[in-house]
Image: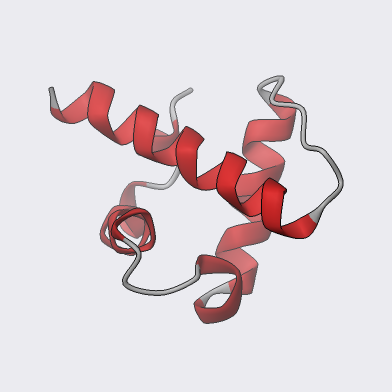
Amino acid sequence: MTVTSRFKKDLSTLRSAVRGDFFLDVKNPKLFKKVRKFYENDGVVFSGDPLDDYDILIDCIAEDLETVEA
């Protein structure tokens, strides 16, 4: 399952977070936790530092959105 199929109704929110319009963990903490859990289950390893982890998560989302839109 891909992030785009799992979070289909939240794609516009995820795109906005990737663009830097807002911080996903501040604007929508529930979605942030769900997406993070999704990537953890997919094998992404987070560092434990909240700022680094946020960047890792946003990079993963951006990469997945690029792949779908390309």
Q: Is residue 55 left or right of residue 70?
A: right
What residue is at 31 percent from the left and 52 percent from the top?
Answer: 11
What residue is at 49 percent from the left and 34 percent from the top?
Answer: 60
User: Which corner quadrant holds the C terminus?
Assistant: top left
Q: Residue furthest right?
A: 48
Say which quarter of the image contains residue 5.
top left
In the rendered image of this protein, does residue 49 appear above or below residue 25?
above
In the rendered image of this protein, does residue 17 appear above or below residue 34?
below
What residue is at 26 percent from the left and 22 percent from the top?
Answer: 67
Please state the horizontal and vertical placement of residue 29, each as a whole percent of the image.
Answer: 63, 72
Q: Is residue 51 left or right of residue 7?
A: right
Q: Residue furthest bottom?
A: 27
Looking at the image, which is closer to me, 35 or 1? Answer: 35
Q: Is residue 60 left or right of residue 67?
A: right
Looking at the image, which is closer to me, 39 or 60? Answer: 60
Please state the horizontal and vertical placement of residue 55, each as a whole percent of the image.
Answer: 57, 48
What residue is at 15 percent from the left and 30 percent from the top?
Answer: 69
Please state the horizontal and vertical placement of residue 27, each as a whole percent of the image.
Answer: 50, 80
